[in-house]
Image (cartoon, grey):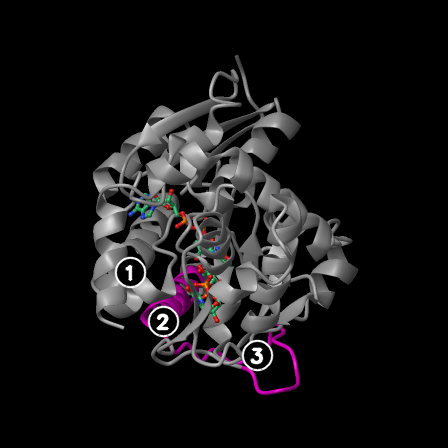
Amino acid sequence: MTFDKHILVTGGAGFIGSHVVRLLVQKYPNYRIVNLDKLTYAGNLENLTDIQEAPNYCFVHADICDQKAIERVFSDYQITDVIHLAAESHVDRSIHGPMEFVLSNVVGTVKLLEVARTSWSNKSNHVFHHISTDEVYGSLGESGFFNESSPYDPRSPYSASKASSDHFVRAYYHTFGLPIKISNCSNNYGSHQFPEKLIPLMIHNIIENKPLPVYGKGDNIRDWLWVEDHAKAIDTIFHNGEIGHSYNIGGLNEWTNLELVNFLCKCMDEKLGREIGTSANLITHIEDRAGHDKRYAIDASKLCSALGWQPTVSFEQGLDLTIDWYLSNKEWVKKVTSGAYQRYYQKMYSSK
Ligand code: NAD
Ligand code: DAU
């Protein structure tokens, strides 16, 4: 079988990566999608059972820090393009142990860049699309938005590692002419998100009647985007974005954490047939996250006006779909939260 492109997607067994892989495999039968993932606690091949037999999909179990393995993949699969999502992604874990973040997010990214640089002789036929975060811009006050010209001001070990990787990606463009694109997205939510992140953790705890741990007063603000809209934005930028450019992705959907958790509680009470107010009684304010960024808000007008992308799913719709997915996939939650995760979670909360 011949393919028009051979795209290496790193981190394709994770939350966002699995949505990106599914979209590309189903939309582009003329592309081969090579999913490379280390399968850390956050990577799970069950996220992709529906497409694992597709003739244009394959999986490689490898670490992006293993340069020899990456070289073999580039050569064996004649990789023409990279969409790079593999990373340690949870801010709280980066506070408890920054080094994994330096290794996977910084060193791993540079190794991948190095293999792309040395493998692609005619650079004009390729794209290296780096997936990054709005957290590289730091924290906003009550007003204003992050746009592509906002200065970098990362404040957690996670965001510092992502900012560093963005700088390396740009350096490979300026120094070596590597054909790169970067996208910086706001908070994602949807199915298959590891239940250590706010929304799936709260859904899980509501189902289990466990306390809902809100950091500090709960007045920090996040800008939430439906994960499939992020995957569509990546598809758009990968195909139509300009080489060397960055694009911010977000859906103008700001919520304080407390407002969001209260709304989630109300939706869950309705779904579970509980009296309204039952779940909100589980809200427990706990010690704040160290260096907790106050507010993120994305100005995505460059992506919307230049490339015609728009979010398609409202927060109410998306949250409804997300709750339904977690209610129907309790076994998935049980599986991914057993073993090492339980030990991490208990250690983290015993130190709060
Ligand atoms: P995730 O933690 O759910 O998945 C990360 C995946 O990367 C996992 O499958 C894991 O096994 C894999 N991985 C980690 N280290 C690896 C390594 N060294 N080699 C190979 N594979 C490795 O993360 P996510 O939330 O899906 O985020 C994906 C990307 O998107 C990350 O780069 C993250 O910084 C970025 N991002 C996330 C969000 C969000 O809200 N979750 C928003 C903006 C940007
Ligand atoms: O903005 C994009 C970023 O969004 C991504 O780059 C990260 O990979 C992703 O994890 C996410 O980072 P956040 O730190 O914003 O997400 P998290 O779900 O961990 O937390 C969201 C907010 O909720 C944050 O203000 C902290 C708060 N929170 C979180 C948890 C897990 C709580 O109050 N209680 C909790 O138990």
Per the image, the residue denoted by label 3 is 150
Residue 44 % position (x, y): 38, 35
Kind of residue indicated by mark 1: Phe
Of all residues shown, which one is farthest toward the front?
A: 275
Q: Which mark is residue 160?
A: 2
Residue 329 rendering spot, x and y as whole percentages: 49, 34
Marks 3 and 2 close (CB-CB < 8 Å):
no
Calculate the distance from the C-alpha at mark 3 to the C-alpha at mark 2.
15 Å
Tell me which segment is drawn in magenta. Answer: 140-169
Front residue (pair 348, 37): 348
First in residue order: circle 1 vs circle 2:
1
Q: Residue 5 location in percent, x, y?
A: 54, 30
Question: Residue 101's mark?
Answer: 1
Q: Is residue 212 left or right of residue 2?
A: left
Q: Secondary structure at mark 2?
A: helix
SS at badge 3? loop
Q: Residue at x 57, y 79 (%)?
A: 150
Pointer 1 residue Cβ closer than 8 Å to ligand 1 = no
